[in-house]
Image: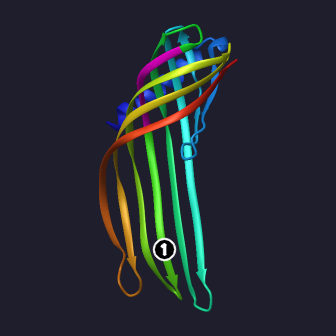
Amino acid sequence: MKKSVIFVVCLGLYISQTAVAENLGLGVSIKSNDASIYLPINVHEEFRVEPFISYSSYDGRENEEGLEISYKNNYSNLNFGIGFFKIQALKEQISAYYGLRSSYTKNEQSFNRIEESNKYGNEKETSGYTVSPIIGFEYSIINDLLVGFEAEWWFSDLEGKEVTSYGEPVDDIKTNIKNKSQGTNTRVTVRYFF
């Protein structure tokens, strides 16, 4: 399955490189927890190919005063892939679109408590694919500037490793992880075509 996702991403990047420049755009999602950047390409007036990338991270640290104890909490998420959409004009400035996004997903997460020389905590690293059927609507503010709203149902299949530390003298415990999850998401997008 991983080979299929890589193939779809490479195919989308190839298509995007061969598309006509006047149909190339740049887009962003303006939802607070979704920092996605899109490269929409209108291959035809009714078909769009859209490579995208999103990245988010969190790095938290805390020290307890008077004690030699510190806490560290880190999280990062990387998604990159491609979407294929059918576009249907509804009115002069309003259109609907529907299609599928597929992406490679990588998550890293850790929580550690460091007390003197001992480290207690948990670290996870997973990767895999995410697939999302999507439906959305766009409003053309001016000819080349579109504001959109989209809804998706996503499915994710990730696997990786987890390491749990209990401090000295206990060895770290390593576990293989397989996670399948699904959910829904909505976002507001802004796309500009050059």
In the picture, measured across the screen, residue 31 lies left or right of residue 170, that is right
Question: Which residue is nearer to you in this view: 171 or 179?
Answer: 179
In the picture, measured across the screen, residue 114 lies left or right of residue 8, that is right
114 in relation to 173, above or below: below
Residue highlighted by disc 1: 112
Provide residue 112's location: percent of width, then percent of height: 48, 74
User: Residue shown at 52%/24% (left/top)?
Assistant: 50
Q: Quadrant of residue 60?
A: bottom right
Provide residue 156's location: percent of width, then percent of height: 35, 42
Magenta residue span: 95-103
User: Residue shown at 45%/48% (left/top)?
Assistant: 106
173 in relation to 180, above or below: below
In the picture, measured across the screen, residue 193 lies left or right of residue 1, that is right
User: Residue shown at 44%/44% (left/top)?
Assistant: 105
Main secondary structure type of the part rendered in magenta = strand
The verdict on residue 37 being magenta is no
**Disc 1 on helix, strand or loop?**
strand
Which quarter of the rendered picture does the N terminus lie within? top left
The verdict on residue 100 being magenta is yes
Question: Which residue is nearer to you in this view: 157 or 142?
Answer: 142
Provide residue 91's location: percent of width, then percent of height: 54, 8
175 in relation to 20, above or below: below
User: Residue shown at 49%/78% (left/top)?
Assistant: 113
The amino acid on which the numbered mark 1 sits, given as a three-letter code, is: Asn
Query: Farthest front residue?
Result: 91
